Amino acid sequence: MFDSISSTALQSALDGLAARQRATADNIANINTPHYLAARVDFEGALRSAVAGGSGAARPTESRSTDPTREDGNNVDLETETLSSIDTQLRYQLLTQAISNKLTSVQTALRTN
């Protein structure tokens, strides 16, 4: 059960969200750093492909934003980063709840046998 595609996919998604949260935190920390380009983390497409391929294992990829920069060469936008942080936190909570529910199901199954 713990080696299932869904369990592997859940772990991959948690890893991707954790990487995104770290990138968002770095972006906010560097909001006033000249020539800093915001980091973006993507894993959803790779995760979809991994699940479709039967493994569920996917790694996040990080790239630099190509959004326009300010005069100092920095392109971090606090509003974008704040929304990304909130979205990431909500998704992380949803996934941890899914894992908790899966573990509860296993515990229930073990008690009834």
Image (cartoon, rainbow, N blue to C red):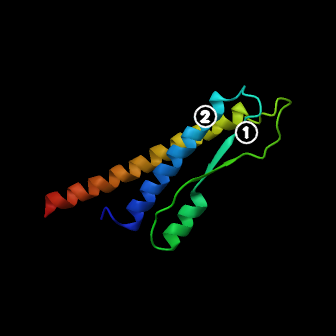
Q: Nearer the viewer, residue 44 or 69?
A: 69
**83 lies above or below 64:** above
Tell me where residue 90 appears, x and y as whole percent. 52, 42
Tell which residue pokes out farthest to the bottom in this image: 53
> Residue 30 at what x, y percent from top left?
67, 29
Residue 72, above or below 4: above
**Disc 2 crowd, CA 10 A, few/some/many (<14, 14-19, 20+):** some
Quadrant location of the C terminus in the rendered image:
bottom left
Identify residue for label 2. 26
Q: Is residue 18 above or below residue 110?
A: above
Q: Amino acid at mark 1?
A: Leu
Q: Residues within 10 Å of mark 1 (few under 14, many from 20)?
A: many
Residue at horizontal 21 percent and vertical 57 percent from the top? 108
Instruction: Name which of mark 1 and mark 2 comes first in the sequence.
Output: 2
Going by the picture, which residue comes out furthest to the top? 32
Could you tell me which residue is drawn at 59 percent across and 37 percent down?
A: 85
Residue 52: x %, y % from top left: 52, 72
Q: Which mark is residue 13?
A: none
Q: 104 or 82, which is in the foreground?
A: 82
Instruction: Name the residue tied to disc 1.
Output: 37
Q: Of helix, strand and loop, which one carries label 2?
A: helix
